Image (tube, coloured by chain):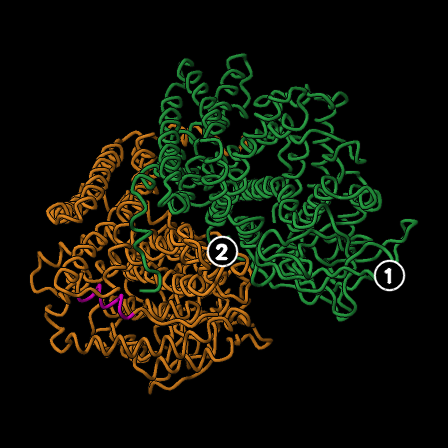
Chain colours: A orange, B green
């Protein structure tokens, strides 16, 4: 397994040159300076490279084991690595100072997340879920709940989980059956929960003192469907009034899953109420559980996209290291490493160009999140939020689909060695494969984009983004050398506009609107992802070109130019095909009888 | 794990309707009739579905274990399932009667292979390797070697292996170092081999009485490079003059690999000559080992393509079964299985359309192989062989790349369940992932196509295929309803012609010809694969449409029409983007410095 070096230089390129550290100008980030941020990135890189990354292969090999006593044993070293993360104060870096965090901008928090997921995706999931619990609680919890639970969650000494899925309720959460029964005869304002939840990430483990489960459940008298679902907080250990830990609650890990990847992350089936019922507290309003959950899910989806990018980055590093080392065949008459063969180099450049494009788009989205949360001007906040809403399904689905493909290409670069588990390339593919599935499958993301997000504002927010793409087109066209990139990006922008019109028009059709949205959703998201990432790479080309013109001829900028050229002229064309796919219509899908095969 | 039903109906559609059983009209197939072939397919389907398929998951779970005594224990039931295959006479169905086989056409043998690989790819590898050994021996072995070894190999009671790779010699076999030392002081005409081979599929096991290793090695006085390499036959057990088994030869399994997939297939490191040297016999001419190996490799590559299709078919069946069973969400206002959601149906139809297209192309190639081997007319044989030569790298690389993607899409259809190993979808992805790597990586296939195969005849053979594509375009255009498919296919054919011109012209350039071939190889193969599979699906549409016109309105034909529409109007456009990729030139690849990241 090759060592992992967190991509500080690449992250800084995006933060400084593409995003110009604009988040730092927002109200509330007064203390954050470029110097501070660089120091934060360097420190995070040490944690990622020196503490988390070396455990990645071991975590995969050992996996998690459910013990006889119902506890879960993590792979060796995972609990200590998580402790190092907590002690370094990393859990709170993106949490607002009002909640006890450090309140750094989202662009910084996302950069750190990318590094940690690249180092050890299975371990990275633990704080990712905690962040969701913090978000839900901070937005919807009562003051009492916040006071009791938030400080420890922000610190990271307690971790959080999201309990949504049940066997019959996956993408369709309206089918949740877990019951939350009021206890008028008992002291306190709690409920008792009964039911079973599956696929609970980090649902049970010993790495933290307590685990705070956020659980979707239904009161006995609740109506069917979405409106009967409420959100409850169920701690693993009950918390005494003085904040100390009390009795073990009636929630147990019934089993853990044997999965394709992320073996170091315990995926649990949790049983609530095998005895008296698990004590839980209502979070937010009755019947608004799904809405409350979605508050935090939006940001969790961004984090999953970032996670995909972390794994893609590691796959790049692996493949480059191998290709620069492995001597095989000849290039231009003499013995050469395989990185000299242009067909191998095509794979390397494709992996690098795509990872760069995905990263730039995810961090652009993070920067918009900073504006949406912190800008002084209300209209500015709203406009940024509208962009965030459109971008998040793209960042989640496109990054994770591409991450799977990038990791698979990484296996291919290794040849036969790629198929041998000890090499480590295969683990990245296995780990990456979950990301298009969880936090809403990529199909659900596409429906969210082509349906709700596009239809509600008639495409206004996306049209605004396309205008920015077109501004970059103009800059490229006026730039001389980079004009061919501008031509290519212009074609992409035109395709996205045309496809958007089809999805908007047919989506509004009262007869077949829903069918049209379902049919076109995936190719539409795919097209949007290609065009928006290509846009970012076009901007990267402009910056890299300017840096070289101003005398900075470092190899870094030359590589960025090659990656941008590849992204716009060899990657974008593949994405543009999605316009033809959408123009082909939905008849063959509608006609197709899956049971007739 | 869902049961597997070998796709007899789909295979028959290709053999009867697309290929019109034309192989049966060739000299030498007098006894084979459509009825016989249908009976063969039905029987093979029983073996695949009832004997081999039920062991697939267990083979994955148990894997192979190297014992203390150097032997390898296969998963439970594998040896018996292989015996059932031998006893059924399946090993010889495609081998000529002169060699003791049944001499059925390649289209039939390939169909049976597809079924068996779909049932159990790990087990299917065993006879696949034996077939290579038979081929090499039949073409290049002395009469004595053939007499001693061929009958048992054809029967299957002995199995064969291919020993090519060494740690420093993978894609570049010129670096082989294994030594074969003549033994003038010993009785017989054997050599003694010393060296280590890696990645030897089914290199050691107890499922057959003997294992016949075909080994690339170098005589002590041999020149460096390719011309010093010869081919040797090294039996696990020496064979006495009366054909009985003698002493154990000095070849041992040093270790087996821990792999991403095909766990039921033992991948061995073999040590030759740890003691006195492994006794081996020269096969064919000294110094021609690589050429002899490539005789058989061409056909082995076709088999790997077919293997990919087998796994893709199984992934389809899995995904369809799940999607038709899993109720989630609503479609048109009422509860529905996920197969009713058009975004899921897009995945299902994409999987089906692609698998159908790949199958039709692979069997078209097999039919051309039949002509190349059996046609009475020499010119006809040569023309068919030229097509086979062009098609084989496409069938190998395109089928296996697509198979990985199809298996990955199959995981996605399952949602969270897809990531759980017990479901079985993930195994198909893990198993499929090796196929783009072995028997020459897909990069090597692309170089073979864009380099040797295209340049040597100036693209004549491929141009002949494109003319056939254009004939199908005309038929579609004249067909009324299917005219839109003709338009789409015409665009694909034009792209392939244009791309071919670029690859031919730039490939001939004395300055940068080799670079151009390397740079364009993969997108060119990818484009060719899309156009040729779309062509076959265009033909499928014509046949299905005719069947419906003649009153056969069975759902099967309706599904085939939907699959063809999808293949031509939604899959082909993605492939067509490769023309733009090629037109973008190779500058960014040539400029890219992989060490500068």
Q: CA distance from mark 1 to mark 2?
A: 39 Å
Image quadrant holding the C terminus of chain B, namely: bottom left
Q: Is residue A464 visible?
A: no
In the image shown, does A347 or A463 lie closer to the viewer?
A347
In which quadrant of the rendered view does residue B140 lie?
top right
Q: Identify the residue at horizontal 80%, vertical 52% (top origin).
A: B208
Instruction: List the residue tagged with mark 1.
Output: B247
Instruction: List the residue tagged with mark 2.
Output: A329
Do pointers 1 and 2 mark residues of a single chain?
no
Q: Indicate the position of residue B263 as horizontal and vertical percent values.
A: 63, 57
Q: Identify the residue at horizontal 67%, vertical 66% (top origin).
A: B255
**Where is A475 relative to A289, above or below?**
above
Q: Is residue B260 magenta?
A: no
Single out the mark in the foreground, 1 or 2.
2
Q: What's the chain of the residue with tag 2?
A: A
Q: Is residue B34 visible?
A: yes
Please indicate whether residue B47 sits to the left or right of residue B586 in the image: right
In which quadrant of the rendered view does residue A214 lie?
bottom left
Q: Identify the residue at horizontal 39%, vertical 73% (top origin).
A: A212
Q: Bounds of the magenta span? A: A8-16
Q: Quick one: SS at disc 1?
A: strand
In which quadrant of the rendered view does residue A510 lie?
top left
Please indicate whether residue B501 sits to the left or right of residue A36 in the image: right
Label ID, residue B434 = none
Please indicate whether residue B125 sits to the left or right of residue B209 in the image: left
Q: Indicate the position of residue B168 as horizontal and vertical percent values.
A: 56, 62
Magenta span main SS: helix
């Amino acid at each position: 397994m090759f060592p992992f070096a967190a991509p500080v230089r690449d992250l800084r390129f995006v933060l400084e040159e593409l995003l110009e550290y604009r988040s730092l100008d927002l109200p509330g980030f007064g203390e954050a300076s470029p110097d501070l941020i660089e120091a934060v990135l360097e420190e995070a890189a040490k944690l990622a490279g020196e503490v988390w990354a070396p455990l990645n292969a071991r975590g995969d090999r050992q996996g998690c084991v459910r013990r006889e006593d119902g506890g879960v044993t993590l792979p060796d070293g995972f609990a200590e690595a998580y402790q190092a993360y907590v002690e370094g104060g990393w859990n709170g870096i993106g949490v607002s100072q009002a909640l006890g965090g450090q309140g750094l901008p989202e662009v910084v928090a996302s950069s750190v997340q990318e590094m940690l997921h690249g180092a050890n995706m299975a371990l990275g999931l633990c704080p990712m879920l905690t962040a969701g619990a913090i978000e839900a609680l901070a937005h919807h919890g009562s003051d009492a709940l916040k006071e009791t639970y938030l400080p420890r969650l922000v610190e990271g000494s307690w971790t959080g989980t999201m309990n949504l899925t049940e066997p019959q309720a996956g993408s369709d959460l309206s089918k949740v059956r877990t019951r939350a029964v009021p206890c008028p005869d008992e002291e306190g304002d709690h409920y008792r929960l009964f039911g079973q939840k599956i696929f609970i990430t980090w649902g049970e483990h010993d790495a933290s003192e307590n685990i705070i489960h956020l659980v979707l459940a239904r009161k006995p008298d609740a109506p069917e469907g979405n409106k009967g679902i409420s959100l409850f907080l169920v701690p693993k250990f009950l918390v005494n009034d003085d904040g100390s830990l009390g009795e073990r609650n009636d929630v147990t890990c019934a089993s853990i899953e044997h999965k394709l990847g992320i073996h170091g992350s315990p995926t649990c089936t949790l049983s609530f109420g095998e005895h008296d019922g698990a004590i839980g507290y209502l979070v937010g309003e009755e019947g608004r559980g799904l809405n409350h959950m979605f508050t935090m899910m939006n940001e969790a989806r961004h984090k999953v996209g970032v996670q995909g990018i972390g794994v893609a980055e590691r796959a790049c590093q692996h493949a480059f290291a191998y290709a620069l080392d492995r001597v095989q065949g000849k290039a231009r008459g003499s013995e050469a490493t395989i990185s000299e063969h242009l067909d191998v180099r095509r794979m390397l450049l494709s992996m690098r160009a795509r990872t760069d494009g995905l990263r730039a788009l995810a961090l652009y989205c993070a920067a918009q999140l900073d504006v949406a949360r912190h800008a002084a001007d209300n209209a500015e906040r709203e406009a940024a939020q509208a962009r965030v809403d459109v971008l998040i399904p793209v960042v989640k689905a496109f990054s994770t689909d591409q991450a799977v493909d990038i990791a698979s290409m990484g296996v291919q670069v290794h040849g036969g060695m790629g198929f041998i588990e000890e090499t480590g390339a295969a683990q990245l593919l296995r780990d990456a494969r979950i990301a298009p599935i969880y936090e809403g499958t990529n199909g659900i993301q596409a429906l969210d984009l082509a349906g709700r997000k596009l239809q509600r504002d008639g495409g206004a927010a996306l049209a605004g983004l396309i205008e920015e793409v077109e501004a970059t087109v103009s800059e490229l066209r006026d730039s001389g050398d980079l004009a061919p990139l501008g031509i290519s990006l212009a074609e992409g922008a035109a395709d996205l506009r045309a496809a958007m019109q089809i999805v908007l028009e047919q989506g509004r059709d009262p007869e077949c609107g829903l069918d049209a949205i379902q049919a076109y959703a995936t190719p539409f998201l795919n097209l949007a992802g290609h065009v928006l990432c290509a846009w970012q790479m076009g901007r990267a080309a402009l910056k890299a070109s300017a840096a070289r013109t101003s005398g900075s001829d470092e190899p870094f900028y030359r590589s960025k130019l090659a990656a941008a050229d590849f992204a716009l002229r060899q990657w974008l064309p593949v994405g543009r095909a999605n316009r033809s796919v959408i123009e082909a219509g939905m008849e063959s899908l509608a006609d197709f009888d899956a049971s007739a095969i």
